[in-house]
Image: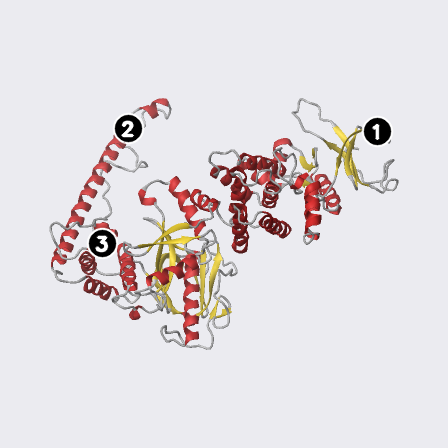
Amino acid sequence: MKSLIIEKSKMGLEEDPELLVKGWLFREVCGSWIKQRCYWFVLSQDSLDYYSSSERGARRLGTLVLTNLCSVIWPDKQTFKETGYWSITVYGRKHCYRLYTKHFNEAVHWACAVQKVIDTKAPVETPTQLLIRDIEENKFNPEVVDNIYQHNPILKHTQSPLYAPLLPFPYGSLEHTYHSGKGYATVREEAVKLFNCLQQLESARDPVPLIQGVLQTCLDLRLLRDEVYCQLVKQTSCTPQPHTAAHLRYWQLLTCMSCTFLPGPAVLKYLRFHLKRIQSQFPDSEMDNYASFIGEALEKTRCRECVPSWEEIQVLMGRQEMLCTVHYPGPGSCQLHISSHTTANEVVRRMLEKLGLKESRNTFSLFEQNAHWERAVGGSTIIADILTRFENLSAKEPDSDSQWRLCFKLYCLLDADAISVDSIEYLFLFEQCHEMVVRGQLPACEEDLQTLAALRLQSVIGDFSTHSPCPPLDELFPGHMVEARLLMPPCVPPALLPATQPPAQGCPPPQRFPGGLLGGALWNHTATAAHKQKVEQDLRLRSRLKEEAAAIMSTIVECWKGLAGYSRRDSMAAYLTIARQWSGFGCTLYEVDFYISSTGSFSQKLWLGVAATCVSLYRQGEAEALESFPYGQICSYGVSDSNTFKITAGDRDLLFETTKLTEIMQLMNAYFSAIRRQRGRGDDVVSITEGTAIEVGFHHLLPTPTPTLLELPSHPV
């Protein structure tokens, strides 16, 4: 009797066709010392009931009415491990049934049956939804709309708390389980809490933290966005004192919402109608200005990645624009006014206009960077999201070396020869070339690197003087070249014998005490001597590094003295002349693990150079490419799996493991896009291997748009 009953019985399905499933289940599972108690559960088309026994006429102990808003949590292994029972949870409006059984198939059968009943129910509509529909149907009849507002307080501003959401939400779901780790209750409970936060805005001394909290909840719990919009429309309708600062707080939050998330189609129509109604009721008022600003924002808003920063909320509350600082190579920077919708592409276009680079054949991009890291910004990325991320990172890492900034730089060097020596673009080329030199990404002999450092000093400071401030060596010369002189395999001192060597005959064993309390408390003479020797070696190594750095700096300064009279332009030109001797000049280098065989049996660290005409492979530090693949020979490229990049050139598949998958994809896409644009203009700037068609990521180059991140079949690595 305690198994699922589906055969004929006194309460069989044949006698009562409304009954779908019935059987014995545990309501709660307690400790082993308490006797478990079963109940007789019956599932019908309308409810889940349980009885004291299976006899006809048994007393019904409880009922859970099933509607479209009910939900079922399926059995999980964790509960089975903890209790020894498989459980299903059924959420209703007032009750939650947690049911247990020892049989997995029985639990799944009940879960499926309850879910099927829930799916057959008509969607539940709240009074607010019904009234929104009435307003939409009568929006061209102001008298009817006014009558709807007059007779339905749920649509109007209130000082009383809200006891239930304005929109329907499931009574319990996996979303609640997923977000409970962040401290959230169920969506219905969070909706009621948010209305309480909205009411606190009226009296808050500083509204920004409350606004950020509401926006963060809406970012985490997507279902609540429409609810908060409806709550804000309610609190800005038929307000007793519409012109007070307390009431305008609702409009300020509505402004921040409209620049962060879009509501669903039905709520968006209702919101637009509300804005027009307010504008007609209160022309030339602050509410009219906010409604106009919100209406324009709704035309541009895409869902944001981050909650607006403190600064952005401040400017949105005043319907202003933010000031964004964009640096460029060298000491220069520009300040631009941006909105919550400004993208990286728009900032690049404005920087091109400001710096007079619109006619350049090369392409530019924004970069996120700090002292140790740099990454190109996607063209559709919202700049306000980047600034918010910078603010959050700076709060976590107050170190000055970790300060983040936006930088405008050369991205695709398509024609270095066409850059005028007197242009700011030439300065960009010089500064970015020097960045590669300092990072050790320009293969050159030590003598050339010292000459480049001297030319850098001459271009930045001018003629040598004993009073001139000289920058540190790591800003002029690659640090790995200094270390390479000193890195030799250390000798193992005789005192440090391997632990596996047997002790000499007649000597006591090395461990005289058992490995217990005394073993951890006594000094180990050998370990102490080894540690002391290591510290001395480190000190000697640092001393030698300082000596070598001083010798290199002395050589650079002597070379610098010989450049007296060189102008800044001449120094930059001489610097770039030396740099151009490398055949890979102008390419962007990425460190990759290159798999020699398709099975990944052997790999080696190389540089992958992405340039205007080809993709090349270099051994790190070597000037000559191991192999180059012109774009005309590349059939496809893309992401093979989570950290593997694949290039197909002819009948060869090249596999690279790298952490820079997205950056490589974006740069190759940008080069192919530039090639296509120049071909369309008939330019012969970039030489491309001739062929009938160039295929990129299984798409033809000429007729299709710029390829995006392409998913290729997984390759065994």
Spatial CA distance of label 1 from label 2 is: 79 Å
Residue located 71% across and 23% down the image: 35
Residue highlighted by disc 3:
477
Figure check: 521 above or below 439: above
Q: Where is residue 414 in the image (x, y as percent from the top left)?
A: 35, 68
Q: Where is residue 272 in the image (x, y as percent from the top left)?
A: 60, 51
Figure check: 313 above or below 592: above
Figure check: 235 above or below 477: above
Residue highlighted by disc 2:
524
Residue highlighted by disc 1:
58
166 and 459: which one is in front? 166
- Nearer-N-terminus badge (3/1): 1
Q: Quadrant of residue 443?
A: bottom left
Say whether residue 83 is left or right of residue 521.
right
213 and 465: which one is in front? 213
- Nearer-N-terminus badge (1/2): 1
Q: Quadrant of residue 588?
A: bottom left
Disc 2 residue type (three-letter): Asn
Q: Position of residue 369 (x, y in %)?
A: 36, 51
627 and 600: which one is in front? 627
Say whether residue 513 is left or right of residue 304.
left
**Dot 1: what SS?**
loop
Q: How many marks?
A: 3
Spatial CA distance of label 3 from label 2 is: 43 Å
